[in-house]
Amino acid sequence: MKRLTNEEVMMELKNFKSYKMNNNQKQSIENELNRLSSEKTSPFYHIFRFSKPLLSMIVLLFLLVSGSYFAMNQAEEKTMKYITGSGIFLHGDETFQMKKSEDFILKRNKDGSVFFMADGKKVGGVEPLTEDEKLKSIQSQNTFINEELEGYRYGGTFILDHQKTMEVTQILHYYFNSPHSKLNYHVYFHTPFFNEDTAAELAHSFKIYNDGKLLQGSEENWELSTEFATPTFEVLVGKKDSIGIAGPPFIAGKTDKFLWHFFGSHNEVEILTRGDFKVIATNKESGEHERVLVQNSGMVWSYDFQKDSPLTPIEDIGSIHSIPTNMKFSKSGIYRLDTYFGGKRFGSIVVEVK
């Protein structure tokens, strides 16, 4: 490309077309500059200048506060749900089961509780409670008997509640403590639809599961009962000065004769004369309750005895009462044998069945 000389450059510049502003155009530009200058010196200039980012910050802050408030309300609502027995149960990992019966049906409710229904009427039920709810439930009753549960899978409290209604005369309340959670399971039965024996049998069948696994009660003792000698040197299996049993080894599927011996003083006499003698055998592995007493070639829960029947002590043994029985176990394993008289528990022994 050829380089231009100075003279040639000057000639080119003279040939460029030039433009000039008239007075109106100059005045218009001057007016605009004056307007801008006056806005900058206005006291509201800086406010308007930062109004948009400030508004954005206010909106953002409002959203943050609103979100926090909503989250706190949600957390509070969630906490409220979990402070009731129903809330803990529904959002927990526990379930419960009971032995089925043809006499009534189980109606499960949305809050996790269960009603026992017969002929369209409520005759009992199960409800999960917190400790506070349990105390309020007990305080609302006309308590006739209040005692600690013994011989059941789970520890707790038994209440006999007197009622004065057309359909219910008493309510039998069992409060079982969960060994896994803070729940108390309130299992209750209305009389006369249930009596002490039928209620106790169903209460013994009550089981708590955690993620499908059966929970063993903290009150359960599966240590094998030891042997002890009587004054006549006869060897019994059981607990010295309390309860013992004499007989052959325990063999599954075989019916044998056994002699039960009961020891004690005045307090024990009151229990031993209450009525029917009952034995509930609990298998350690399965947790199932079984009949082991044999009568007329059939398996029974209890032998019939009248209330205040005379005791049959054996002086040589030192017992205050003795009962001969026939017993048979369905299978081998460890069994706990809980004994009752007229629905009142006396004691238990743990044996191994070969």
Image (spheres, grey):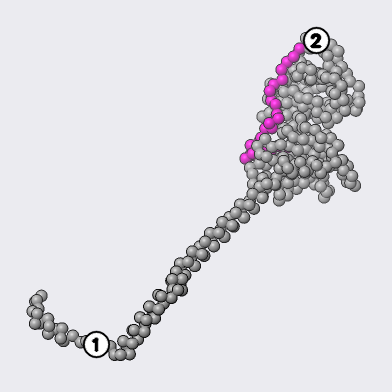
Quadrant assignment, res 26: bottom left
Question: Which mark is on residue 231?
Answer: 2
Residue 222 shows in the view: yes
Identify the residue at image location x=71%, y=36%: 177
Residue range highlighted in magenta: 206-229
Tell me the kind of residue under disc 2.
Pro
Query: Judging from the image, what secondary structure is the residue with disc 1 in?
Result: loop
Badge 1: residue crowd in 10 Å (few <14, some 14–19, many ≥20): few
Tell me the kind of residue under disc 1.
Tyr
Question: Which sits earlier in the primary sequence, circle 1 or circle 2?
Answer: 1
Residue 226 belongs to magenta span: yes
Name the outermost residue toward the bottom: 23
In-front residue for pair 139/333 = 139
Pinpoint residue 350: horizontal percent, then vertical percent.
Answer: 72, 23
Identify the residue at image location x=80%, y=33%: 147
In-front residue for pair 238/241 = 241
Residue 166 belongs to magenta span: no
Pinpoint residue 173: horizontal percent, then vertical percent.
Answer: 80, 39
Q: According to the image, label 1 marks what residue?
A: 19
In-front residue for pair 115/285 = 115
> Which quadrant of the rendered structure holds the N terminus?
bottom left
Please state which of the two labelled residues, at mark 1 or mark 2, is closer to the viewer: 1
Query: Judging from the image, what secondary structure is the residue with disc 2 in?
Result: loop
Question: Which mark is on residue 317?
Answer: none
Quadrant assignment, res 312: top right
In-front residue for pair 283/135 = 135
Pinpoint residue 20: horizontal percent, then vertical percent.
Answer: 25, 88
- Would you place residue 209 above or below residue 15 in this image? above
